[in-house]
Image (cartoon, grey):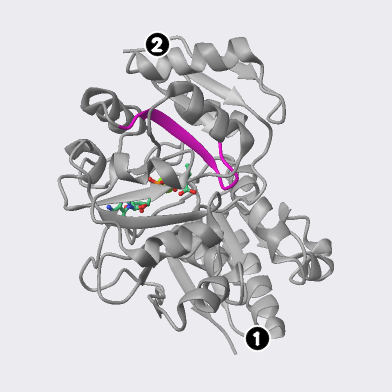
Amino acid sequence: MTIETQLLVVDPQRPDTAVLTRAAAVIQAGGLVAFPTETVYGLGADGLNETAVRRIFQAKGRPAHDPIIVHVAETADLPRVAANVPQMAYELAARFWPGPLTLVLPRGTAVPDAITAGGPTVAVRCPQHPLAQALIRAAGTPIGAPSANRFSHTSPTTAQHVWDDLAGRIELILDGGPTPIGVESTVLDVTGAAPLLLRPGGVTVEELTAVLGPIHVFERQGKAPAAMPAPGMLDRHYAPQAELRLFTGPETAVRAAMRRTIALERENGRGVALLLAAEDVPYFMDLDAPIGNVGSLQNLSQVAQNLFRVMRELDVPATDLILARDFPAAGLGLAIRDRLRRAAQRFISTG
Ligand code: TXA
Ligand code: MG
């Protein structure tokens, strides 16, 4: 079934009241509204309405066993969706909310199975983006929202990305401009004895450690983990249509290996594009290959902001293969590296 998708441009700082009223009405009627958060665009539905949440899965083509984050406007709304909230969660909320941190908590009774995938926990986030805040408040209900992309595709950082993936499948897209952080929220499970990082994201491990002390970090080494440890760790995500090959190792070795691969794959008649840091670009200028420059190694916030957009821009029919460089794991680098690893089909270790 195709539905008519409306796209409305909104000033996030001063959202038009009529637009907010319309968006809130869509949510309250069980419809779907895509909206910007500070991380990526989300695909929102009334988080307490089972039927509405089921429509998210349909629109995305997402398997029902993958649970969804509910978004609240403030910490005071936590009891609407979670039960027996541990003290540690309140400490983390006081420090990081509103912001790009998602807490996995014991599930509240009002939360439908569609949100939790039938599990005993619920993931909750309080976004900081003014348009996300305004929408949740106007709707008057917690909003369930995954990233607003087709399942396993690259997450959207602009309204155009949402349109490309979901036009004809959802009622409304609120265009509040590009999202400032560009990678999704950090997902932290605080239901166990010790906090467990399920997904690195906008709040860095260093920031969490400053509050919690050392935390357990699961870092994927490339291939899928032997057993699926938990939701939030699904592999083969964030993927372009073209094959993505990730090069790790010392800079000079990475660059040399990329150049060899370009020559070889071109002989095989394959279209090769490059996902590079600004510092790499001069080494590839002579090759006449499409280059996606995500920004300087000295500015990982900029790299995070550009990453998904550049992945989408390189992913055109003429591109069979994207060669990407790896990034250092410090700060936001851990989230950047995680997304590249999930998107990659092959890993080339050099040096
Ligand atoms: O930044 C973000 O988190 C964005 C914006 C829209 O808020 N949302 C987002 O949602 O990235 P999604 O569905 O694309 O990713 C949420 C991740 C998934 O990997 C899911 O498995 C995990 O969080 N998750 C959701 N509920 C969970 C739960 N109860 N326990 C463990 N993981 C959970
Ligand atoms: Mg997602």
Residue 266 is a magenta residue: no
The picture places residue 174, in percent across and down from the top left corner, at: 58, 23
Q: Residue at x 60, y 45 (%)?
A: 38
Query: In the image, is residue 330 above or below residue 109?
Result: below
Of residues 68 and 267, the one nearer the viewer is: 68
> To which quarter of the image does residue 76 belong?
top left
Image quarter where the C terminus lies is bottom right
Of residues 126 and 324, the one nearer the viewer is: 126
Q: Find residue 3 and name its label.
A: 2
Side of 345 where 95 appears, left or right: right
> To which quarter of the image does residue 187 belong?
bottom left
- Residue 344 appears in view: no
- Per the image, the residue denoted by label 1 is 250
- Which contiguous range is marked in magenta? 36-47
* Mark closer to the observer (2, 1): 2
The count of marks equals: 2
Image quarter where the N terminus lies is top left
Q: Residues within 10 Å of mark 2 (few under 14, many from 20)?
A: few
| Amino acid marked by disc 2 | Ile
Q: CB atoms at circles 2 and 1 under 8 Å apart?
A: no
Name the secondary structure under disc 1. Answer: loop
| Amino acid marked by disc 1 | Pro
Query: Earlier along the polypeptide chain: callout 2 or callout 1?
Result: 2
**What is the spatial separation of the Cα atoms under label 2 and label 1, in whole angstroms?**
50 Å
Q: Find residue 315 and name its label.
A: none
